[in-house]
Structures are given as C-alpha cells and as structure tokens.
Amino acid sequence: EAQVTQNPRYLITVTGKKLTVTCSQNMNHEYMSWYRQDPGLGLRQIYYSMNVEVTDKGDVPEGYKVSRKEKRNFPLILESPSPNQTSLYFCASSLYPGRRLAGNVETQYFGPGTRLLVL
Amino acid sequence: GQNIDQPTEMTATEGAIVQINCTYQTSGFNGLFWYQQHAGEAPTFLSYNVLDGLEEKGRFSSFLSRSKGYSYLLLKELQMKDSASYLCAVRARTDDKIIFGKGTRLHILP
C-alpha cells in the first residue's frame, strides 16, 4: 500500500531536549516536504527536498533541520525545541508537485501528522 | 511578498452548490492545488490547475484564471461529509516552494 508514515504520532517534550520526527514514503517519490499547521495560520512549509542530498528552506525553517540521505526518508530535527514549536506537523511526498504523467496528476501525499507539545 | 487569500468560513445547505474562492499573489506560478482536510486529519488532494479553465472531477470542479490570480473550487450536491476545511495552495515557479492559504472551513447544514 502506497503511504507516507510519520513517527511518533504524538510527542510531549521539554524545552531544549533534542528530538527527531521521522518520515518515510514507499512510493519512490523525489519531492518531500515538512509542514507545520497552527490555528489561524494554516499550513506553512518548513523545509523541502527535491531529491537525495538536496534540501531547501521553506517559509518557516528557523529552529529546524532536515536531512535527505536516502530517497525514502526525510527526518525533521529539532535541535533545541522551544514552546513556540508546539504544533501539528505533516510530512508529504510526491514525484514532483503538479507533474502530469500519462494523464494523471501527481500531487502530494500527506502523512498522518505528528502532534508535538513542547513544555 | 507571497500571499494566498480565501474566506475563513462558509456555510451551505445539504444538496446545494457552494463556490470557494482563492486569490493569490506569488513569485511566479506553476500550479494551483485544492485540498480537503477534515478536523484532526491530513489533507487529501482534490484538484490541480496549471492552465486557465475548468477542471471537473465528479461533484468537484476547480477553475483557474492566471491573469487574475484567481481560482475557485465548486462543490455540487453537497453532502454532510463535505463539512471540512478546504485549502488552496500554489507552487511558485521560481523556487518550487508550495504556499498554502489559511483554509476555508465549510459547514453543511441539513
């Protein structure tokens, strides 16, 4: 089954304690992305990656790091979490956003989300 | 700057038709997406437009006018399960970023 998985789904941590949220996809997608979603602000892109070893900042990259050593994995790292990073996080993947292959639109598939609370 | 605007909330009646508008100002344009998101769940893809015109997909249709920076999502024969947030997103040509609007929460009344 084609899917994007994230772990953990729920996490409570304390300020300053490094954490990693994993993201994995089994669709051989090139493009992977991390978003955070906050009430009243919508989805905001944190980082994205066009392929292995290629990563770029989205709109809100401060306080986050990512890596793309393998095509299937795109972990999100919070080196020193702070309370303002409490949020709902989504990982997403696609072949290439908007690419049209054989008449089908390839779009982003989202993981189930990770709820993070930083105390 | 880059900006996507859509109404915060809308209400419609079961069986009716509703149109959700989205206007955008981005650094270049390379496609506009509509997603549906139920509370507490991940967004799911509804439609994609990169050329001007109407794309129809069952009860849902999406329209794009690039010259006006405008799109709408049209939902027909509304059902209670259509109560959700609808997200408009644009991919900027210049840097491959994807920018989302804040979403429109649609309430369906019986």
Image (cartoon, helix red, strand yellow):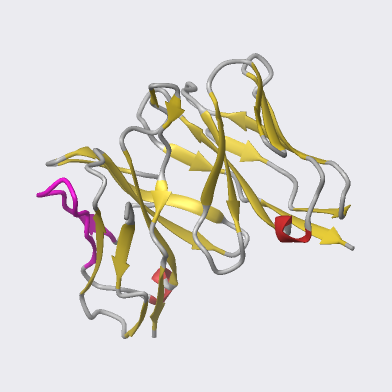
Q: Residue at x 86, y 55 (%)?
A: B14
From the viewer's perspective, is residue B2 above or below residue B36?
A: above
From the viewer's perspective, is residue A117 above or below residue A105?
A: below
Q: Is A72 covered by the magenta stretch?
A: yes
Q: Position of residue A19 (x, y in %)?
A: 23, 74
Query: Dividing the picture into quarters, in which one does residue A99 lie?
Result: top left
Tally of numbered discs: 0
Quarter of the N terminus of chain A within the rendering: bottom left
Compare residues B26 and B16 and report the one nearer the observer: B16
Q: Residue at x 61, y 62 (%)?
A: B38
Quarter of the C terminus of chain A within the rendering: bottom left
Q: Position of residue A26 (x, y in %)?
A: 24, 51
Query: Dividing the picture into quarters, in which one does residue A89 lie?
Result: bottom left
Compare residues B37 and A67 and report the one nearer the observer: B37
Is B50 on the left-hand or right-hand side of B79?
A: left
- The magenta stretch is A64-78
Q: Position of residue B46 (x, y in %)?
A: 58, 41
From the viewer's perspective, is residue B105 above or below residue A21?
A: above
Q: Is A40 covered by the magenta stretch?
A: no
Is A43 on the left-hand or right-hand side of A73?
A: right
Q: Residue at x 53, y 34 (%)?
A: B2
Compare residues B58 and B1 and report the one nearer the observer: B58
Is B49 on the left-hand or right-hand side of B16?
A: left
Chief SS of the magenta region: loop
Q: Position of residue A71 (x, y in %)?
A: 16, 45
